[in-house]
Image (spheres, rainbow, N blue to C red):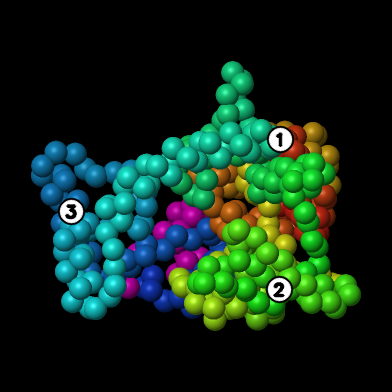
């Protein structure tokens, strides 16, 4: 059926709705085996089209215009008043809180966040700037609102380097003492107040103790409970557990952030996984050659009309600022198709943070 539709229409993209579109096995075969370049499945793909049909008819009768244009977001659905949602949660016995009551705190956080950006600038973080010299903004995380300060494709890395540099400066000035290769063993509590820690020197094996007016435990992680993760092997939950045993309250102890964009392990020596870089989509234009014979050519010799800006083609609303997991899967499709001919990354804008472990990086910069 798919081949027949392709022969009759000559279209490159297939959109399916209705009960037939709920056959996941058949959909997977159509996507993998072609002949269409891409397939889009309407998420609410039921047999009854009464809802959409009624809405279209009402629009036509009220405005005299036929509804048109692409569906911008498949997740749009009915809205419910907050009171109705609260009654549902209370009836189900679910603990909840209306965050609208914390708008003052949210506004205060927005005010303080500006100072954090200024502090990062003072630490040397090279945030992107516009032509007038002001800090630039762009969208982030799939949002279509430009409200995020960024450092090209290396924001996280540059923030870490800025923090490390500031810490090293204070260490050299003598205001901070740095004790490396220590593992916390226990929390010292005096009259219900945390006053210090005991730890083990991982080099000598000696047990040491440290005291202070305040104790901050900035540690965590699950080590290798999930085999490999993006956490370092030394990031364990020992400190959190010891604090809990001494009476500290815990919130969301099972919270784990899942990154769908990790690069697989590439050697027995590797103790953690590497995340795909922001440079997968950045603010340049990602492309691969349209023709297989162009894959061996230098990037500068490939004309613009022979370049496939695949993120802009597949996700026109987001373009190269599509969420990183989506951009990663799109890049992998280009790699699997050998669209970059085994070349290293070609870039006209910096993409040095793109992982070298990717053998055929489906990304070039315009």
Task: Compare residues 320 and 56 and report the one nearer the observer.
Answer: 320
Task: Compare residues 52 and 176 and report the one nearer the observer.
Answer: 176
Answer left or right for 64 relative to 171: left
> Is there any visible trace of residue 79 in the rendered image?
yes
x, y percent for residue 41:
41, 63
Answer left or right for 172 relative to 213: right
- For the residues labelled 3 and 1, the Cα–Cα distance comes to 54 Å
Q: Disc 1 designates what residue?
A: 124
Residue 55, label in figure: 3
x, y percent for residue 123:
69, 37
x, y percent for residue 182:
78, 69
Q: Disc 2 designates what residue?
A: 198
Mark 1 Cα shell of 10 Å, populated few (<14), some (14-19), many (≥20): some
Residue at position x 15%, y 44% in the image:
60
Task: Compare residues 238 and 234 and report the one nearer the observer.
Answer: 238
Image quarter (top left, top right, bottom left or bottom right) of the N terminus: bottom left
x, y percent for residue 332:
67, 60
Numbered range of the magenta stretch: 1-19
Q: How many marks?
A: 3
Answer left or right for 94 relative to 316: left
């Amino acid at each position: 059926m798919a081949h027949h539709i392709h022969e009759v229409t000559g279209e490159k993209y297939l959109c399916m709705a209705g009960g037939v579109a709920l056959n996941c096995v058949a959909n997977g075969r159509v996507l993998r085996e072609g002949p269409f370049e891409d397939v889009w499945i309407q998420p609410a793909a039921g047999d009854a089209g009464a809802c959409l049909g009624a809405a279209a008819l009402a629009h036509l009768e009220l405005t005299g215009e036929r509804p048109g244009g692409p569906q911008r977001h498949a997740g749009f659905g009915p809205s419910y008043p907050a009171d109705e949602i609260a009654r549902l949660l209370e009836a189900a016995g679910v603990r909840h809180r209306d965050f609208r009551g914390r708008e003052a705190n949210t506004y205060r956080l927005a005010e303080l966040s500006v100072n954090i950006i200024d502090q990062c600038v003072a630490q040397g973080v090279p945030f992107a700037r516009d032509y007038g010299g002001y800090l630039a903004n762009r969208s982030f995380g799939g949002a279509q609102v430009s409200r995020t300060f960024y450092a090209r494709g290396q924001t996280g890395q540059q923030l870490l380097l800025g923090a490390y540099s500031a810490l090293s400066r204070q260490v050299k000035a003598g205001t901070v003492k740095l004790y490396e290769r220590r593992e916390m063993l226990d929390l010292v509590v005096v009259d219900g107040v945390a006053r210090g820690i005991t730890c083990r020197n991982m080099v000598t094996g000696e047990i040491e103790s440290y005291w202070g007016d305040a104790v901050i435990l900035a540690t965590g992680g699950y080590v290798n409970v999930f085999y490999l993760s993006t956490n370092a092997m030394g990031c364990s939950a020992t400190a959190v557990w010891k604090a809990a045993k001494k009476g500290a309250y815990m919130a969301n102890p099972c919270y784990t952030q899942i990154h769908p964009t990790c690069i697989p392990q590439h050697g027995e020596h590797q103790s953690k996984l590497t995340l795909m870089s922001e440079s997968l989509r950045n603010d340049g234009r990602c492309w691969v050659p349209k023709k297989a014979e162009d894959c061996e050519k230098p990037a500068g010799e490939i004309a613009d009309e022979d370049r496939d800006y695949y993120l802009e083609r597949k996700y026109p609303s987001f373009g190269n600022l599509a969420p990183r997991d989506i951009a990663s899967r799109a890049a992998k499709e280009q790699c699997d198709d050998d669209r970059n001919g085994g070349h290293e990354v070609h870039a006209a804008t910096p993409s040095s943070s793109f992982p070298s472990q990717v053998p055929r990086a489906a990304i070039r910069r315009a």
